[in-house]
Image (cartoon, rainbow, N blue to C red):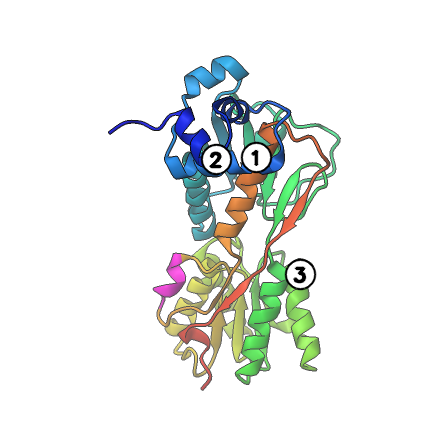
Amino acid sequence: MRRPTLADVAAVAGVSAKTVSNVMLGRNGVSEATRRAVLAAVEQCGYEVNLAGRGLASGRTGRVAVVVPNIYQPYFAEVAERLILALDARGLTAMLQIAHDGAAEREAVLGGRVRDVDGVIVCPHVAFPPDDTAPARPVVQLGGVPTGRWDCVVMGEREGADAVTRHLLDTGRRRIALVWNGAPGVRPSDDRFAGHLAALAAYGVPHDPALVAVGSDWDRRASGYEAMVGLLRSGASFDAALCINDAVAAGALRALHRHGVRVPEDVAVTGFDDTDESGFTVPSLTSVSPRQGEMVEHAVAMLLERIAGHAGPARAVRTGADLVPRASSAAV
C-alpha cells in the first residue's frame, strides 16, 4: 500500500505542498486556520512525519514529555494513555515521566530532568509555587490551578462537584460526608469543595465539618477505605459519601460493605473522574466525567501551536463536567 505523501496532504487541505511543509516544520507566516486545516489533513491521510528529516531541518526531536504524578491512580493512567495516543496521531512520540512530588514536577518542567523534547504536557499533583524561572521549552498544564506562566486546561471541578452534590440532594440525602484529601482537621479549599458548598447553600443545607474524612494519601483505594473506617468509628450520622475521586470511592465502598452498611440503601456513594473502574465496582459507581478527551485535545492543540512558534500570553481553557449517575447513588 502506498504511503501518503506531502502532496496527498496538500490536496486534502487545499493548499500547496510547500505550505504543508511549512506547517510541519513550524515556520512562521502560516495563518492559524491554514495550520489547523493542514494538521487535520495529516490525520485524515494518515501521513507519517519523517522525524529524522524534520529534526535535521528544524532542530526539533518530534518527542514530547508527558509528566504525571503516578500511574496507579486510574485517572492519571487513563489521561496518560489518551495523551500518548493523541500525540502519536500527530506524528509525535511521547516520553512518559513519573514525577512523584512537587520537586520532581518542577524539575521535569523547568529543569533538565527531561531532555531532548520539543515540549512538555504536565498533569500536576500539587500547585506550582510562584517562580520567575522560564521553562526551556513549551509547557502545557493539564488540570490544576493556572499559573499564568504557561497554557493550562482547567478541569470543570467546581461544576462537577456542584452537579453531583445536587444529585445527592435530589435523591433525598441531607447528611453528605466528604471523603477528601488534606490534613486532618484542615478545612478543604479547592474548587471541588467550593462547588459542593454552593450546592448545599442552594438547597439550604448547612455544611457539617464533622463530616469531612481524610486518608493518608488521596490517590489510593486504601486511603478511601481508611477514611471511611474512621468516619464510621466516629459515630457521625451520614447518608451519603461524596469522594474526591473514583479510587478513593472504591476504597470507601469496600469499607462500607465490610461494616454491613448497604449502598445505596443506607449510604449513597459517588466518585469523581469517571474512570473505567467506576462501571465495575459493586454497586456501579456514580461519578463525574471531567471530559478527559476534550481536555487532552485542548492540551495537545495548544502545545503544537507553541511548538510551531505561537508566542502569545499564557492561555487558560476551561472544560465542563458531566454527571454520570449509576447504582451507588440511586434513590431509595
The residue that label 1 is drawn on is 34
Label disc, if present, on residue 188 of the rendered structure? 3
What amino acid is at disc 3? Answer: Pro
**Residue at the spot 42% in from the left edge and 37% down from the top edge:** 43
Which amino acid type is marked by label 2? Ala
Residue 289 is labelled as none
Looking at the image, tell me whether mark 1 or mark 2 is earlier in sequence order: 2
> Which residue ends up furthest to the left in the rendered image?
1
Which secondary structure dominates the residues rendered in magenta?
helix
Inspect this view and state whether residue 91 appears: no
Residue pictured at 43% horizontal, 46% vertical: 77
Part of the protein shown in magenta: 276-281
Could you say where residue 188 lies in the image, as x and y percent from the top left?
67, 61
Asked if labels 2 and 1 touch by Cβ distance under 8 angstroms, the answer is: yes
Is disc 2 placed on a helix, strand or loop?
helix
The quadrant in which the N terminus is found is: top left
Which residue does the numbered mark 2 point to in the structure image?
13
Disc on the earlier residue, 2 or 3: 2
Q: Does the magenta stretch include residue 262?
A: no
